[in-house]
């Protein structure tokens, strides 16, 4: 998942989607490529300590040493150290190939500002979830990164309008004009204001509507060629 700017909620959605998939019985690996390790903090009860994903990229640890089991069954994390540094696309591709057969899904939580340096990383994904907020800066950031990318034409893009409220419907209309189908995840005070230690806490506090929206997004990720009606 990519948000192309900070604050879009991509790490929370990456963690929620991973948790939901694991709850459905899918074995999931969440790869935290973010600079702050937000997904790591949400999906692990505590800092696992080294080795981190950055140690794997630097050749200091094997992929088996890096992956950590979360407190929740079937959810695993390749944790960020909060000092991630450059992501080596070749090493990441090796990791993805290595875990194939061990897990059903790999969710990549991309950095906030991917830029061209992360094009090879995004190109490894089968599905690109483009997380945006209903505001001009967010639309510009995602559009500036995604539009015109060579790899984008070969990928299934799932635009996600996060923190949505009906009063912001003009932004939804604009997004539909460009992409067609758009997934919305409603603005949910539980995710914004509630003090949640873990992604399980966050999931517990979701409103019924938001939980259904997350489930619908996950269903599309689970079966990317399935037409989902809203």
Image (tube, grey):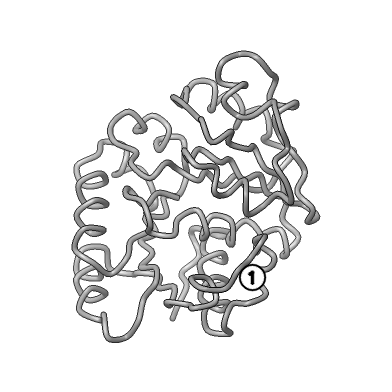
Relative to 136, does residue 143 appear above or below in the rendering?
above
Q: Residue at x 55, y 42 (%)?
A: 37
Q: Quarter of the image holding residue 18?
A: bottom right
Residue 19 pos. (x, y %)? 66, 60
Label 1 CA crowd tier, 10 Å (few <14, some 14–19, many 20+): many
Quarter in which the C terminus is drawn:
bottom left
Q: Would residue 180 be found to the left or right of residue 218 on screen?
A: left
230 relative to 72, above or below: below
Q: Residue at x 75, y 49 (%)?
A: 70
When asked about the image quadrant of residue 151, the answer is: top left
> In the depicted view, which residue is nearer to us: 1 or 127?
1
Q: Is residue 129 above or below residue 88?
A: below
Q: Give the total number of marks visible in the rendering.
A: 1
For residue 110, what is the image quadrant?
top left
In-front residue for pair 43/222? 43
Residue 54 picture location, percent across and down: 57, 25
Residue 196 appears left or right of 87? right
Compared to residue 182, the image places residue 169 above or below, namely below
The percent coordinates of residue 27 (x first, y second) are: 73, 50
- For label 1, the residue is 203
Looking at the picture, how far across and down is residue 156, in whole percent? 39, 52
Name the residue: 28% across, 69% down.
134
In the visual, does 208 lie left or right of 70? left
Mark 1 lies on a secondary structure that is helix
């Amino acid at each position: 998942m990519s948000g192309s700017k900070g604050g879009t909620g991509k790490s929370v959605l990456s963690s929620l989607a991973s948790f939901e998939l694991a709850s459905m019985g899918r074995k999931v690996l969440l790869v935290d490529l973010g600079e702050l390790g937000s997904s790591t903090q949400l999906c692990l009860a505590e800092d696992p300590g080294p080795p981190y994903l950055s140690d794997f990229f630097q050749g200091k640890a094997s992929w088996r040493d890096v992956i950590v089991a979360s407190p929740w069954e079937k959810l695993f994390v390749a944790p960020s150290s909060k000092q991630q540094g450059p992501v080596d696309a070749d090493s990441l591709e090796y990791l993805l190939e290595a875990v194939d057969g061990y897990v059903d899904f790999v969710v990549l939580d991309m950095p906030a500002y991917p830029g061209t340096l992360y094009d090879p990383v995004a190109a490894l994904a089968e599905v690109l979830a483009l997380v945006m907020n209903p505001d001009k800066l967010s639309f510009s950031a995602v559009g500036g990164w995604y539009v015109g990318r060579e790899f984008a034409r070969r990928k299934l893009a799932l635009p996600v309008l996060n923190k949505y409220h009906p009063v912001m419907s003009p932004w939804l209309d604009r997004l539909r004009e460009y992409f067609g189908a758009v997934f919305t995840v409603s603005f949910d005070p539980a995710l914004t204001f509630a003090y949640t230690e873990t992604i399980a806490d966050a999931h517990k506090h979701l409103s019924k509507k938001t939980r259904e929206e997350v489930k619908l997004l996950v269903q599309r990720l689970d079966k990317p060629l399935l037409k989902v009606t809203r």
